[in-house]
Image (cartoon, rainbow, N blue to C red):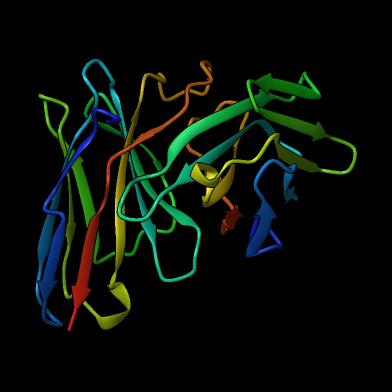
């Protein structure tokens, strides 16, 4: 059973525009959510996180929104840059647990 | 550079064989995690160690085992290998205590690509 779902395998966005990556989860015990970025031949790197007590967290061009009632989170990248082209993974952890449960990833391509 | 070192980068072996993957966590991190990424799949959690002790187990096969040594490096042992075990194996470490009381991102190594032929 996939507890964290990223239903869009890929997304293509023009440089300078907004990229919106979506993630849904089913486990109501999740209380910490993260986004990771992965380039080919490298491990995932931490991008941004949000606690369940918040509904928004911003870090530069990256903003994560959390809608607990809908069990949905999204990552907004504004403006998108070609260097943002990578696979983005959504992840979550339960209260009292350190391990992360990952989604299957969304491949973002930012074209000039 | 995440500070997490995994060796080897690539491993090619035959079915039925046994291999050992090695991971050195970031300096100061006591928690080590192993994940498996098969083709077009997300990262599947295998097992977590905290300061030498097993903390959590995920979808790890009985043919697989792991341990964390006193110097905090960890090894993942895969035995009786099958074609379906071909995957990327990632190690991650964190400053977390293993109890979830501290929300700490995981820092990943660059993975070991295992190919079973």
Q: Residue at x 30, y 54 (%)?
A: A41
Residue B31: x %, y % from top left? 32, 27
Q: Residue at x 68, y 52 (%)?
A: A14
Residue B21: x %, y % from top left? 15, 52
Counting every numbered tag in the picture gives: 0
Image quarter hosting the N terminus of chain A: bottom right
Do we see residue A1 in this rendering?
no
> Which corner quadrant of the image does residue B38 belong to?
bottom left
| B14 over A41 or under it: above or below | below
**The one of B22 and B70 positioned closer to us in this rendering:** B22
Residue B99: x %, y % from top left? 47, 23
Residue A112: x %, y % from top left? 60, 52
Left or right: where does residue A38 sit relative to residue A60? left
> Which corner quadrant of the image does residue B85 belong to?
bottom left
**The one of A84 and A99 positioned closer to us in this rendering:** A84
| B95 over A98 or under it: above or below | above
Do we see residue A65 in this rendering?
yes
Give the farthest residue toward the front: A112
Q: Residue at x 70, y 34 (%)?
A: A78
**The one of A47 and B75 positioned closer to us in this rendering:** A47
Q: Residue at x 21, y 18 (%)?
A: B27
| A52 over B43 or under it: above or below | above
Left or right: where does residue A40 sit relative to residue A16? left
């Amino acid at each position: 059973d996939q507890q964290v779902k990223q239903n869009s395998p890929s997304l293509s966005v023009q440089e300078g525009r907004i990229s919106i990556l979506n993630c849904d989860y089913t486990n109501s015990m999740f209380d910490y959510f993260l986004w990771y970025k992965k380039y080919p031949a490298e491990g995932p790197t931490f991008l941004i996180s949000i606690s369940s007590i918040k509904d928004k967290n911003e870090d530069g061009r990256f903003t994560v929104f959390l809608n607990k009632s809908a069990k949905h989170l999204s990552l907004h990248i504004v403006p998108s840059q070609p260097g943002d082209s990578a696979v983005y993974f959504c992840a979550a952890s339960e209260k009292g647990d350190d391990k992360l449960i990952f989604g299957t990833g969304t491949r973002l391509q930012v074209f000039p | 550079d995440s500070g997490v070192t995994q060796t080897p980068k690539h491993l090619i072996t035959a079915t039925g064989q046994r291999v050992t993957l090695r991971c050195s966590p970031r300096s100061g991190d006591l928690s080590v995690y192993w994940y498996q990424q098969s083709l077009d799949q997300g990262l599947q959690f295998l097992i977590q160690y905290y300061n030498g002790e097993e903390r959590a187990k995920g979808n790890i096969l009985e043919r697989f085992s792991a341990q964390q040594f006193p110097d905090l490096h960890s090894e993942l042992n895969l035995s009786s290998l099958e074609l379906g075990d071909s995957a990327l194996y990632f190690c991650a470490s964190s400053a977390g205590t293993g109890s979830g009381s501290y929300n700490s991102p995981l820092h990943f190594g660059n993975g070991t690509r295992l190919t079973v032929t």
